[in-house]
Image (cartoon, rainbow, N blue to C red):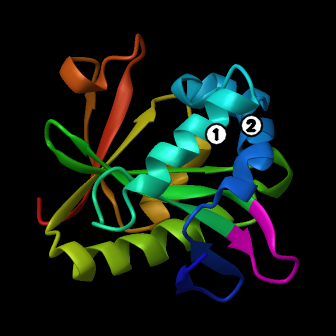
Amino acid sequence: MMDILKTERLNIREFTLLDTKNIYEFSQEESLKKWLPDQVYADLDEAKETLEFLISKYKNKEFPLVMAVVKKASNELIGHVGLSEIKQGIEIGYAIGENYQNKGYASEAVNAYITWAKKEFSLEKIYGVVKCENYGSCRVLEKAQFTYHKDDNEGEFDRNALRKIYIWGDK
């Protein structure tokens, strides 16, 4: 397992299959069910299949490129951060387990990851897409210097909810 980034309180590393149980448990939390229903897994096997897919992307640095967010002090897996392709370009995605929310971990992980990704992939622009009523996630993007672009519920962003679209980088 390879650490990609280190911040003051976090290590951002590649996932391993040893993370399967934690990822499954996170997927059962109410906040994930509400905000990221496509990341809720029916069982451990589905969580493992998802991790196998994500792990397969590391060698060639292909999208989606999703990494584990680990608390340095305890070596606990607390969430994930990653980049995915969308119709408009590249989108940042992230989730932090409920026990670790409202402590600045998401902001710390997103800031570090977009700085790394900009250099690694020569990205000029990264999108952030969140449900309008997910105020915490909106705040994470704003703290990471994303700028509100528009509300959208069409095309790739249509998940039966109005979304706020943010952009980081060149508008």
Cα distance between the residues tagged 2 and 1: 8 Å
Q: Quadrant of residue 109?
A: bottom right
Q: Secondary structure at mark 1?
A: helix
For residue 24, which numbered disc appears in the image? 2
The reply, left or right, for residue 139 in relation to residue 170 is right
Check disc 2 and give the amino acid type.
Answer: Tyr
Q: Above or below — where is 9 with respect to 37?
A: below
Q: Nearer the viewer, mark 2 or mark 1?
A: 1
Q: Work out whether residue 169 or residue 16 is closer to the camera in this orientation and state it.
A: 16
Q: Above or below — where is 78 with respect to 2?
A: above
Provide the residue span drawn in magenta. Answer: 70-77
As for residue 115 lying within the magenta part, the answer is no
Q: Which residue is mark 1?
A: 48
User: Which quadrant of the figure contains the C terminus?
Assistant: bottom left
Q: Above or below — where is 122 with respect to 88?
A: below
Check disc 1 and give the amino acid type.
Answer: Lys
